Amino acid sequence: MNQTQKNYAMRRLEDLAFRKKNEIEKKYTNPGDYLTTEKMYDLIKSGKAKLRPKKAVMGCEIKGYSYSHQSHRMEWTLRDIFKLERFETHPVRDTKKIEKAVTRLESEIQRLRDKIMLGDSQEALDLLEAFVKKEF
């Protein structure tokens, strides 16, 4: 294998490793449940979402309020006016499983790097194809 072929194989391995790490992150992360506008309206109509206190809505205590220069008035979102936090869940990562899988992945990547640098072109191609199919 010449230097150009080795460089290509190493770049391909790094690209595959990046994709595998992203797959691991997705696999061990609960995406959470954010409210859509329709869900917010349903909660408000049903009476489950309660109003925030008047001083919080009318005062400057609101986070995320914006000033519209065209209309010269304050604009608020539904989240500013109604208490909607308890109806949402945030993403949760299982860091122990992610770290364990990434450690296995990195050891496999190092093994493949060594094989690419010390082996022939057909062996490197076979190893890359097997790496694509492997689960971590």
Image (spheres, helix red, strand yellow):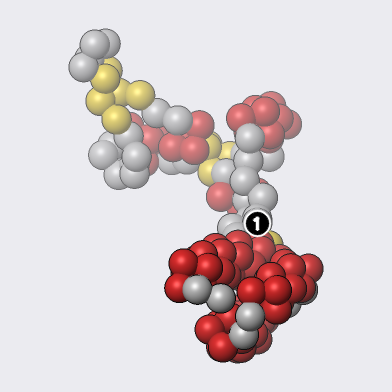
Name the quadrant containing residue 91.
bottom right
Could you say whether the residue bearing mark 1 is in a helix, strand or loop? Answer: loop
81 and 14: which is toward the camera = 14
- Residue 24 located left or right of residue 59: right
Q: Residue at the spot x=68%, y=39% of the render? A: 48
Which residue is labeled 1 in the image? 31
Q: Position of residue 129 (x, y in %)?
A: 74, 68
Give residue 5's position: percent from left, percent from top: 53, 68
What is the crowding at mark 1: few (fewer than 14 residues within 10 Å), some, or many (at least 20)? Answer: few
Q: Look at the picture and state if 41 lies above or below 104.
A: above
Name the one closer to the observer, 46 or 17.
Answer: 17
Residue 59: % across, % down? 28, 37
Does any portion of residue 73 appear in the rendered image? Answer: yes
Q: Quadrant of the N terminus?
A: bottom right
Q: Hey, which quadrant is residue 89 in on the image?
A: bottom right
Q: Is residue 109 visible?
A: no
Q: Position of residue 64 (x, y in %)?
A: 34, 40
- Decide which of 45, 72 is in the foreground and name it: 72
Q: Residue at x 26, y 20 (%)?
A: 68
Please indicate whether residue 61 sits to the left or right of residue 85 in the image.
Answer: left
- At 67% from the left and 50% from the top, the residue drawn is 33
Could you tell me which residue is drawn at 45 percent across and 30 percent down? 77
Q: Quadrant of the C terminus?
A: bottom right
**Amino acid type of the residue that numbered disc 1 sits on in the rendered structure:** Pro
Give residue 53's quadrant in the image. top left
